[in-house]
Image (cartoon, rainbow, N blue to C red):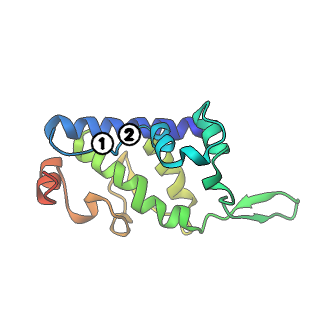
Amino acid sequence: TVDIIASVSNEALQIKAAIQKSYPDIDLKDVRFIEDFFEEAYSDDIADHSSLRNMFHSNKGYDGLAMPTKKTEAGGYLPIFDHRYLNEDLPGGILVQKGIAELAGVPTPVMNKVILWCQDQCVPPKEYLVDGKLQGKDIATTKTPQRYGFKDLKTFIEGNRYA
């Protein structure tokens, strides 16, 4: 899982680079590798800084946070997918990053895999990503630029007065 998180973080940095190539004056200093973010945001709460995996596992800020589960008849546990992690964080988080990546022409193979898995786990299942593009029937429930009709980076950046 931490490898996927790091890969998504690297894709976000590629989006940042593409935006700054066209708009070098936009301040995107807060877009940084997740490990750097953790060091700044949680430094005092992390017991083990030796790797990203250990930073997650030893972060006191995450104590008590877990995916909700339900016990099965066999005595195991299954995730409860009808939860804010998928219902809120997906349409307002990684989908927004994916949307900006599309406008900037940045490929996001790892984000795509995460989105495809997540949209299938939603209750009820959602359709955001189709054929690698944010063009599914549920885009209107997201905060992506595509929901608001943006089709290119220039219109998105300048229309929102980011530059």
In the figure, is residue 57 to the left or right of 38?
Answer: right
Q: Amino acid at mark 2?
A: Arg
In which quarter of the view is residue 27 placed? top left
Tell me the quadrant of the picture where the N terminus can be found: top right
Q: How would you rate the neighbour count of disc 1 (Cα within 10 Å): few for under 14, some for 14-19, many for 20 or more?
A: few
Q: Which residue of the protein is positioned furthest toward the front in this rendering?
A: 44
Instruction: State whether residue 141 is above or below residue 26.
Output: below
The quadrant in which residue 46 appears is top right
Q: Residue at x 31, y 59 (%)?
A: 144
Q: Residue type at mark 1: give it.
A: Lys
Badge 1 element: loop
Query: Does 100 sit above or below residue 52?
Result: below
Residue beneath disc 2? 32
Q: Are marks 2 and 1 in contact (CB under 8 Å)?
A: yes
Q: Is residue 73 above or below residue 135?
A: below
**Residue 17 screen position, x and y as percent:** 26, 35
Q: Which residue is mark 1?
A: 29
Query: x, y (%) of residue 155?
Result: 12, 54
Name which quarter of the figure residue 95 lies in. bottom left
Which residue is found at the position 54% from the left and 69% from the top? 124
Which is more toward the observer, 33 or 154? 33
Please say whether residue 143 is visible from this viewpoint: yes
Expressed as whole percent of the image width and height from the top left, the position of residue 6 reads 50, 36
Say whether residue 127 is visible.
no
C-alpha gap between disc 2 and disc 1: 7 Å
Residue drawn at x 28%, y 49% is 100
Question: Which type of secondary structure does the marked residue at label 2 adopt?
Answer: loop
